[in-house]
Amino acid sequence: MMKADDFLKGRGAQFNPANPYLKQEYVQDHLEGLDEPMVSNSKTEFLKEHPKKVVNKVDSPDLGLGYSLNPYQGCEHGCVYCYARNTHQYWGYGAGLDFERKIIIKENAAQTLAKQLESPNWQVMPIMLAGNTDCYQPIEAKKKLTRTVLEVLLQYRHPVSIITKNALILRDLDLLEELNKYDLVHVSISITTLDEELRQKLEPRTASAAKRLALVKKLSEAGIPVNVMTAPIIPGLNDSEIPALIQAAAAAGASSAAYTLVRLNGSIGPIFEDWIKEAFPDRAQKVLNQIADCHGGQLNDSRFGVRMHGEGQFAALIANLFRMSKQKYMAGRSMKPYNYTHFCQRKGKQLGLF
């Protein structure tokens, strides 16, 4: 693990936990036997993939969604708590630094999506962009995979849900407005904290809260239904900000707000523990204890029905604070429903556009 003198600025994780899916890995067990130190390259790498399938059915009863589509695997934003880190291990990489610096690009995402939408067995339900990693992370400015995916969804008149922390989404406002004409789009903007110092440590390569609130305002003014995700709530770090977050979201024009409680499954646990002991040594143990209190005494929790909001004393206090804040600042607001009746298959015509 990297400590003070070796701290990698701009990265959330500071090391790669062992990948449980790999039988072998490079380690530094015998430093005295090395002529030169092992150097870890912190530069971001982009790796191309051409999967045969890009839309996956969401089976989790906690999410209430139909499908997810992730044009990118891995994320440069570097949010230390990100639950998606564990999925990077399936590709043979680490959930820590590798997740932030080895970004997999699905270059055929739009074409493959169109093929899947052409299936005679296709069932129309919202596709989430992106249920795993941010579809508007920095590389999207160059690759434009998310934009081409939205173009396909507009052609097919297919409903879509987008969640992001990046103002780059405004580049695609023209497509969002067209989708909205048919009631086909919901946007969620994730705002974890209004404390810029905390944001820089917790989510080192994301936009500031001020920029995200400006984004909520811009989208809302354009008539786009916007939900603000005050997520994750981390006891002892940002739970006290819930009223201020909801108030700011409401003032910016958000139609709704939601939250999830942090859970540190798999490799995220040691990554987060290493991070908080370095970033907030004075309250690290208190935060870890409160997180565990919300998840039956463990940092990780995979139980459907309770994993998203936790249980116990601290979880109940957070739920009540969120409920009262939403009643106070967002009473009567809601996301308008999708319209599924516009969907039309193109019988292969869409594929000719690529």
Image: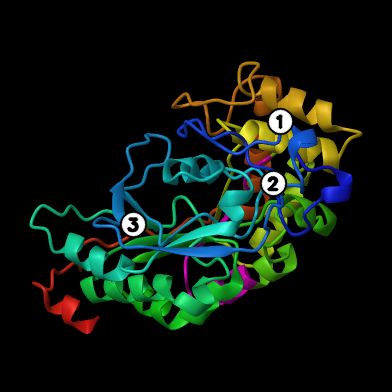
Dot 1 falls on a residue whose secondary structure is loop
Say the numbered circle drawn on residue 29: 1
Three-letter code for the amino acid on which mark 1 is drawn: Asp
- Residue nearest the observer in this picture, 235 or 137: 137
Most distant residue in the right direction: 282
Three-letter code for the amino acid on which mark 2 is drawn: Ala
User: Residue visible at 36% across and 58% down?
Assistant: 337
Q: CA distance from mark 1 to mark 3?
A: 45 Å
Dot 3 falls on a residue whose secondary structure is strand
Query: In the figure, 209 relative to 92: above or below?
Result: below
Q: Which residue is mark 2?
A: 13
Three-letter code for the amino acid on which mark 3 is drawn: Ile
Query: In the figure, 183 relative to 294: above or below?
Result: below
User: Residue visible at 60% across and 63% down?
Assistant: 44
Q: Which residue is mark 3?
A: 127
- Residue nearest the observer in this picture, 309 or 269: 269
Q: Earlier in the sequence, mark 2 or mark 3?
A: 2
Q: Is residue 47 left or right of residue 353?
A: right
Q: Earlier in the sequence, mark 1 or mark 3?
A: 1
Instruction: Tell me if residue 97 can be seen.
Output: yes
Mark 2 vs mark 1: in front: 1
Q: Which residues are magenta?
A: 215-233
Dot 2 falls on a residue whose secondary structure is loop
Q: Earlier in the sequence, mark 2 or mark 1?
A: 2
